[in-house]
Amino acid sequence: ETGVTQSPTHLIKTRGQQVTLRCSSQSGHNTVSWYQQALGQGPQFIFQYYREEENGRGNFPPRFSGLQFPNYSSELNVNALELDDSALYLCASSLQGAPTYEQYFGPGTRLTVT
Amino acid sequence: AQSVTQLGSHVSVSEGALVLLRCNYSSSVPPYLFWYVQYPNQGLQLLLKYTSAATLVKGINGFEAEFKKSETSFHLTKPSAHMSDAAEYFCAVSTTSGTYKYIFGTGTRLKVLA
């Protein structure tokens, strides 16, 4: 069973640029959620994708957008990067309707905006 | 709305001493609760989960947690701390309607003293 993978591991961008982060979900999972973890804080829910559509969103501006592909992998896109976007971005996969509501996390992508 | 509160952003214990990390939740429905550990520069690893079965939940690495509805608590314990337990610990509650997402606490950094 392949776990959740994310790429790249680390990324450095300049303010105003755009970035794309990628996530491959665990085998058998059909839902992907993205979380932002700023330094010293708990992860915050960005949005979730199910059946290739956004299935809920946290308190993040529209410049945070995403995609889910037919193989359930996902991308997180952030436009017009700001310094405060520097964080660890975590992807989590799950099976919609699973009785335990458990999500499985990838290792994260560390984004630094300068 | 559901939420979790972790009391104590930093906890220090001596090696071999009891570890107690506190988590209180707020939920109008039976909660699904999780404890995750995060080592430096890594993603989240599931320690244990409460899914309305047994109130005493045993997890990996000798950790366990007890669900107490009357106290709305889900504290994490380990009888004897090991140096390798030094990490950040997060308590989370899963929403169970609408978009299934995690709401995390702010985390507790555990330091183990030799």
Image (cartoon, rainbow, N blue to C red):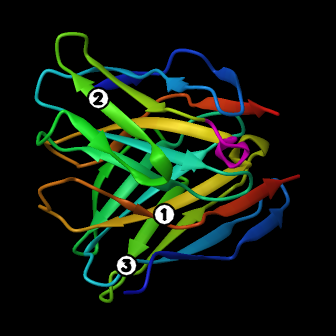
Three-letter code, disc 1: Cys
The numbered dot on residue A46 is none
Image coordinates of residue A7 in percent, x first then y, are 63, 77
Q: Is residue B110 above or below residue A112?
A: above
Same subunit under labels 3 and 2? no
Count of numbered circles on the image = 3
Residue A14 lies left or right of residue B105; in this view the side is right
Residue marked by disc 2: B66
The reply to whether the magenta stretch includes residue B10 is: no
Three-letter code, disc 3: Gln
Q: Nearer the viewer, mark 3 or mark 1?
A: 3
Q: Mark 2, residues whose alpha carbon is within 10 Å: few (<14), some, or many (≥20)?
A: some
Point 70% across, 65% down: residue: A18
Quadrant of the image for the C terminus of chain B?
top right
Question: Label 3, label 1: how many angstroms apart (C-alpha)?
Answer: 11 Å
Q: Residue furthest top?
A: B71
The numbered dot on residue A91 is 1
Highlighted magenta segment, given as a residue range: B81-86
Quadrant of the image for the N terminus of chain B?
top left
B66 or B29, nearer to the observer: B66
B94 or A54, nearer to the observer: B94
Q: Residue furthest right?
A: A114
Three-letter code, disc 2: Glu
The local secondary structure at tag 3 comes to: loop
Residue marked by disc 3: A26
The local secondary structure at tag 2 comes to: strand
Please indicate, yes or no, whether residue A62 appears anywhere in the rendered image. Answer: no
Q: Output the chain of dot 3.
A: A
Residue A53 lies left or right of residue A100; in this view the side is right
Residue B40 lies left or right of residue A98; in this view the side is right
Image coordinates of residue B46 in percent, x first then y, are 43, 54
Q: Output the chain of dot 1.
A: A
